[in-house]
Amino acid sequence: IADEFNLHGVHATTMGATPCVLVGGSARLEAGLNSAHGALGSGSRANAAIGRTLKLVLNNCGGAKLGGTESTTLGSPAKFSLCVAEAEEEGLPAGWAPYHH
């Protein structure tokens, strides 16, 4: 993650800021990611697994330890898993290109 992202600032805030994984292209289909109804809910296993993996990497490699660098007051479901797929087949607004291009 680029220094400009300020990962430490994201971890250290007491609000619910957290990185989001956005997957586009054929990878979203190969991984079985949900880009429709309930994509951030508990029924989207691939989305949850990838988002949870990101959180484990942030904990283990990025030092985002709850009660330490990770200073969130009450927590947020987004800090547990936040992974969405781009629904390219749904069409994008005029002038927008798919994320993976």
Image (cartoon, rainbow, N blue to C red):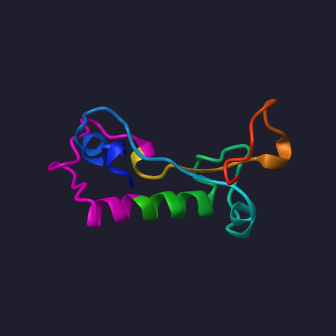
Magenta part of the protein: which range? Answer: 55-78
In the image, is 12 to the left or to the right of 42?
A: left
The quadrant holding residue 18 is: top left
**Residue at image coords 27%, 60%:** 62
User: What kind of secondary structure does the magenta stretch mostly adopt?
Assistant: loop
Q: Nearer the viewer, residue 66 or 101?
A: 101
* Residue 63 lies within the magenta run: yes
In the image, is 78 to the left or to the right of 43?
A: left
Residue placed farthest to the bottom in the image?
Answer: 30
List x then y, in percent, for residue 49. 53, 64
- Please tell me whether residue 23 is drawn above or below residue 16 in the rendered image: below
In the image, is 10 to the left or to the right of 24?
A: left
Q: Nearer the viewer, residue 20 or 73?
A: 20
- Please tell me whether residue 15 is drawn above or below residue 9 in the rendered image: above
**Residue at image coords 59%, 46%:** 40
In the image, is 90 to the left or to the right of 74?
A: right
